[in-house]
Amino acid sequence: MAVHGPAMTDVARLAGVSHQTVSRVLNGHPNVREQTRLRVRAAIAELGYRPNGAARALVTGRSQVIGVVAQNTTLYGPASLLAALEQTAAQEGFAVSVGSVRNLDHSSISAAVERHLSHRVAGIVVIAPVESAGEALERLPKDVPLVTVDGDPNRPVPLVTVDQVAGARAATQHLLDAGHHTVWHVSGPTDWFDSVGRIDGWRQALLAAGLDPPPPMPGDWSASSGYRCGQMLARMPEVTAVFTANDHLALGVLRALHEFGRRVPDEISVVGFDDVPEAAYFIPPLTTVRPDFDAVARASLQMLLSQIESGVSGALRQTIAPALVSRDSVAPPRR
Amino acid sequence: MAVHGPAMTDVARLAGVSHQTVSRVLNGHPNVREQTRLRVRAAIAELGYRPNGAARALVTGRSQVIGVVAQNTTLYGPASLLAALEQTAAQEGFAVSVGSVRNLDHSSISAAVERHLSHRVAGIVVIAPVESAGEALERLPKDVPLVTVDGDPNRPVPLVTVDQVAGARAATQHLLDAGHHTVWHVSGPTDWFDSVGRIDGWRQALLAAGLDPPPPMPGDWSASSGYRCGQMLARMPEVTAVFTANDHLALGVLRALHEFGRRVPDEISVVGFDDVPEAAYFIPPLTTVRPDFDAVARASLQMLLSQIESGVSGALRQTIAPALVSRDSVAPPRR
DNA sequence: GGCGTCTCTGTTAACGCTAACAAAAATTGG
DNA sequence: CCAATTTTTGTTAGCGTTAACAGAGACGCC
């Protein structure tokens, strides 16, 4: 096992050139005679030669790998983001190394970043949705290209994020437009920026309509916590419209409402966030807000790449607007 | 930017030893005096030294990275598997590099494997649920540690897989035990081994009970296709029990049944597969089969590691038994 | 024809680490 | 206390690549 493949010198010998010429062919250097180039390519093919990324990384100081730090990649949002990141990175010739992290506290994040750094990744993307992650990031070495996704809007770190506020505002406004007199909110964990932004947007829409926001009910993204909130909501006759911070919370709410015999959307309207693929098959099909994860991935990778190439780390910021997807879980309130 | 950090020689100079001694400390070599070890560690800490993985990979011939080839990491199964793999690998000191692949055809798989190989990964895990992936794998270089997950049971390649057959049999038997006279099946895409195994298990249970299996209805894992199958099922008065190949299909079926006014579980019982976190909050809560992704990840990594260490690639096979999770979507048939 | 100027190719020296061997220091035994 | 051993440390030589420089032809121009 571990029969090491041919190296550049083997290719060079077969093609009758120096290893440096092989290197030039590989890196698309212009000054190589066409005939030579062809001979080298033939030799590469014949030997099944594959360049050694480690050696290249050693001499150039960085590998064609992008490190990603993420927490719970089973959640729909992070998983989608990660997948999109991989796809985009692959197109640019980069591999993606994932540093999963159990908690988003200072030391876990640092450790994950360190691991990436010791592999000399070209850049790092941190999916940093909570406050504690932000702290860790500011103390990181400043000389490594880094982009955060869904991170703290108030830190001087390059950031790409879904426009949570706009999305939540749209969802809330949609319910208001349907004629509801107010909108209740089941939020995500309040230490997530995503949650904070969605609470903000919801509150803004209500305030703009001259309404007094009811207290938000805190959940934890899970259907289970949505269910618990839904049980309370179901018992409150004045509730006619609910905006939940994600689709799974909405599912739990839907289920609790169903159990209490409160019909959606006839008695209560519900709007979610994320547009998970199953949302269209909830009972009833869920009106929700769809963030464009591909766009987030593209933007963050582009930001990272420009840092890698230019060597400059501008504290850029980019916000991706989500879209409302209207389905059957919203109706005017019964009078 | 790209200020290169201190190297081993810098640490050595500060500690007043040779770089080789530093290397020994780093690699836990036994013959280093305690006092020296401490001095070296202090120097490492003082300089913030971080070993260069690329250099190490170059000289040892392999990096502390495991490559994973997977297709659609947004699906619950693959995403969970990937997350579990990362966690487990991190515990063993390995990073995970993900090679996402659009299609599981020969050339895509080969390309992804090549990319990993050129980074000199220590081993490769291929999540290869379809036939075409299997072909690609047999033509791969034999000298790289490789494990497939959810791959072809009939190929001479190390394989870890969920026991689809047993899971499906349990689900079907559960419905039979409840008193149903037969069980219908909404399957996954028939080119997935997962689907084939689940169809098999379902058929086996039926046959063992002396029943003649009705034709399986082919879906594609999505709630959407489950919905379409559900619409047909709902119109067939003789149907009282359905086993779907995953939970999302079940969700679609549930929704179609609901639309047609067919009540679950009173009129029709449904069992899914995967136990997605939301399954307990479907309407009604879904009885399903839970594969142990952590166990799969542990087993495959262990298999890979033993190949890496021993250098031997036994065509091992390991099957992880799933567990039935009983909830409210199953009841005896109405007479 | 000689000479500067391209274009192409080769030579040499790193990059930061580990492995193999060599030397020095500490320890043991008689 | 000296030799034999063992433990600890140092020295040297790569690993496979790119970068920097050097050399060899080919070409054009005075």
Image: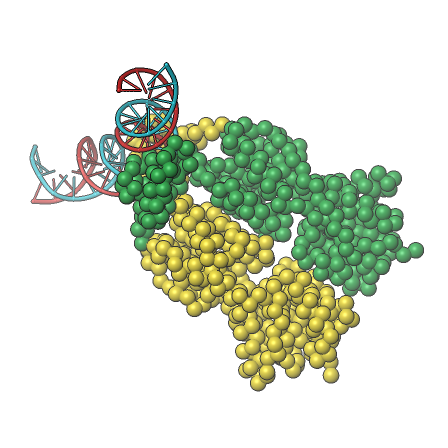
Chain colours: A yellow, B green, C cyan, D red
Q: Quadrant of residue A207?
A: bottom right
In the image, A239 versus A135, the foreground residue is A135
Direction right: furthest residue: B335
Q: Is residue A130 above or below residue B18?
A: below
In the picture, the quarter occupied by the N terminus of chain B is bottom left
Q: Position of residue A271 (x, y in %)?
A: 64, 70
Q: In which quarter of the image is residue A147?
A: bottom left
In the picture, the quarter occupied by the C terminus of chain B is bottom right
Residue B218 in sight in this render: no
Q: Position of residue A1 (x, y in %)?
A: 49, 27
Q: In this view, does D25 lie above or below A319?
A: above
Residue at x-position 55% and y-position 44% = B88
Q: Position of residue B130 (x, y in %)?
A: 63, 41
Q: Position of residue A60 (x, y in %)?
A: 33, 44
Residue at x-position 78% and y-position 64% = B259
In the image, B120 versus A325, the foreground residue is B120
Residue A272 in sight in this render: yes
In the image, A95 versus B286, the foreground residue is B286
Q: Relative to residue C6, is residue A194 drawn left or right?
A: right
